[in-house]
């Protein structure tokens, strides 16, 4: 039995999550569920990033204390994730006491080790990114610097601050990025490495004067400062693994850490995060899994662009969480931005879930009940189908192990298409007691349903119950192996996915 630790970014709760956030979260959830199916000891962490200027201002605009505001919003996020069947083990908030303790502990340790020093700072800041931009990074509109992502004017900031000596880690970071395969897809590691080679790794400001940003963790080395929100946020990943509270658990989980992120926060999750960890003698995470954006009308889907699709709309359109999760995972693309169109998602839902999977299940269920009274006893599995199951299962596990959920789903769809071709060719409805045919088809359904389970957790469990088998943690290998002499009891032939028009 292996182990698997997976995280999502902790999102800013200044607004409701949209399907861009769901894209990342459902993906991480599907990986977590896959590993539970394999029988791995799995820990899945998600949460909210609640400090900093962005949240301070969002609360002010509403006339609320930031804590009051983030309390409401964290509950909202949890409700959205429940609607999408997100099976996190912990929902971490940066205002959680154990996390605040950890931030102080780590900041003080770095200060003691000489990695933090005080100096004057000036630069252009984007509050939406919570990030400084240097010349060449920002865009210029009518002579003024603008954020390249949010297309909003940057703010000029000039103040005394504390720096983290990131420059000391340049050689180390380059070595990790260029020699260790810690970033997937690898193109992103090359991107960061070439930026460092071009510009060098510069020290970063990691504190803000309280007079400007009071909503944050107080700096343990200077009570007039709060810790920079990104420095605070990244540490959530080690708080969640038990770095301070349970070192034994941390030592077990950390070597298996997988951070799923969008490409917008790649720099923070590689250059900055790996340096922070090195400063306290912790290995980098096993993998940073990066994906590109969901875009709409050519722009990154986001609140500032005003082009978001709401999670509730996706849930409504695709008849609940299973349909919504499936379409998101089927268009998921680590390398390239994906343009969201209703036509694309509708056609995936209709052709793959409603037709290819749903119809097969319905037809086999109806025939099993009509021809065999619902009881289908063990038979020799059709050779062609048995081979197809084995082939699909091998491909599926390999793709899932390599974080390619889209490809894994494609392998299941291929298997289901073979089963549909088989049923059309064999025409079991014309036969008196088509035992072998139905048993073989049920074996395909059992394997496919189990393989689809991490992405569509509800419908698959419902179907397994209706057909008399069980999807349990650790059961994957057994479920995708054809044969084994079981009896199927088909109590119902459900219509799992109604087509959308
Ligand atoms: O950056 N397409 O939080 P955030 C794909 N708090 N993914 C998208 C997306 C889109 N259009 N829009 C959002 C933060 N995302 C920090 C993170 S972690 C220590 C701190 C997803 O609320 C994607 O995963 O801005 C992206 O990286 C993340 O939401 C940004 O969420």
Image: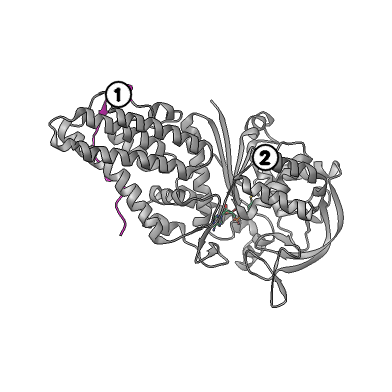
Sooner in the amino-acid sequence: mark 1 or mark 2 = 2
Tag 2: Cα neighbours inside 10 Å, few (<14), some, or many (≥20)? many
State the residue at coordinates (76%, 63%).
134
Residues 407 and 425: in front is 425
- Quarter of the rendered structure image containing ligand 1: bottom right
Quadrant where the C terminus is found in the figure? bottom left
Q: Which mark is residue 238?
A: 2
Say which of marks 1 and 2 sits in front.
1
Q: Secondary structure at mark 1?
A: loop
Q: Is residue 447 visible?
A: yes
Query: Which residue is at the front of the view, 351 or 269?
Result: 351
Measured from the top left, where is residue 486 in percent x and y?
A: 30, 24
Residue 128 in the image: above or below residue 325 = below
Question: Which residue corresponds to mark 1?
Answer: 486
Residue farthest along the top direction in this orientation: 485
Assign a secondary structure to mark 2: helix
Q: Main secondary structure of the magenta part?
A: loop
Q: Is residue 147 left or right of residue 377?
A: right
Image quarter of residue 113: top right
Q: Which mark is residue 200?
A: none
Q: Is residue 261 magenta?
A: no
- Specify whether 441 is left or right of 477: left
Q: Is residue 391 above or below residue 176?
A: above
Residue found at x 13% / y 37%: 430
Magenta part of the chain: 483-501
Q: Position of residue 67 (x, y in %)?
A: 63, 56
Q: Is residue 492 magenta?
A: yes
């Amino acid at each position: 039995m292996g182990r698997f630790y997976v995280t999502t970014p902790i999102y800013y709760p200044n607004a409701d999550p949209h399907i861009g956030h769901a894209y990342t979260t459902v993906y991480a959830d599907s990986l977590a569920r896959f590993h539970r199916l394999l029988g791995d000891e799995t820990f899945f962490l998600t949460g909210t990033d609640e400090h900093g200027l962005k949240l301070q201002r969002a609360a002010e605009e509403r006339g609320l204390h930031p804590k009051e505001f983030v309390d409401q919003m964290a509950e909202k996020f949890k409700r959205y994730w429940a609607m999408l069947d997100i099976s996190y083990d912990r929902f971490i908030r940066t205002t959680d006491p154990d996390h605040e303790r950890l931030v102080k502990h780590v900041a003080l340790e770095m200060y003691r080790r000489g990695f933090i020093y005080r100096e004057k700072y000036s630069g252009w800041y984007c509050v939406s990114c919570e990030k400084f931009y240097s010349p060449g990074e920002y865009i210029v509109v009518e002579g003024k610097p603008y954020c390249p992502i949010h297309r909003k004017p940057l703010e000029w900031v000039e103040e005394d601050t504390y720096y983290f000596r990131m420059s000391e880690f340049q050689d180390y970071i380059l070595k990790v990025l260029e020699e260790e395969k810690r970033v997937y897809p690898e193109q992103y590691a090359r991107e960061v490495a070439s930026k460092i080679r071009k510009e060098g790794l510069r020290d970063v400001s990691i504190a803000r004067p309280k007079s400007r940003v009071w909503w944050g963790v107080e700096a343990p080395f200077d009570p007039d400062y709060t810790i920079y929100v990104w420095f605070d946020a990244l540490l959530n990943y080690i708080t969640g693994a038990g770095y301070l509270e349970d070192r034994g658990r941390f030592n077990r989980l950390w070597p298996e850490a997988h951070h799923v992120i969008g490409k917008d926060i790649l720099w923070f999750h590689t250059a900055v995060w790996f340096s922070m960890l090195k400063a306290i003698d912790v290995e980098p995470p096993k993998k940073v899994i990066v994906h590109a954006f969901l875009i709409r009308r050519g722009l990154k889907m986001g609140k500032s662009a005003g082009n978001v699709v709401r999670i509730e709309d996706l849930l409504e359109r695709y008849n609940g969480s299973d349909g919504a999760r499936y379409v998101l995972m089927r268009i998921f693309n680590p390398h390239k931005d994906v343009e969201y169109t209703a036509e694309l998602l509708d056609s995936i839902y209709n052709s793959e879930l409603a037709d290819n999977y749903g119809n097969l299940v319905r037809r086999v269920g109806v025939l099993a009940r009509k021809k065999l009274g619902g009881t289908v006893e063990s038979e020799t599995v059709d050779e062609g189908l048995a081979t197809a199951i084995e082939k699909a299962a091998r491909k599926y596990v390999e793709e899932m192990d390599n974080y390619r959920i889209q490809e894994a789903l494609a392998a299941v769809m291929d298997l289901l298409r073979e089963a549909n071709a088989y049923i059309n060719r064999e025409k079991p409805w014309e036969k008196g007691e088509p035992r072998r045919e139905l048993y073989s088809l049920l074996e395909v359904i059992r394997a496919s349903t189990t393989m689809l389970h991490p992405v569509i957790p509800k419908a698959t469990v419902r179907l397994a119950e209706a057909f008399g088998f069980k999807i349990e943690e650790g059961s994957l290998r057994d479920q995708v192996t054809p044969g084994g002499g079981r009896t199927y009891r088909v109590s119902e032939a459900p219509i799992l996915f109604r087509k959308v028009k």
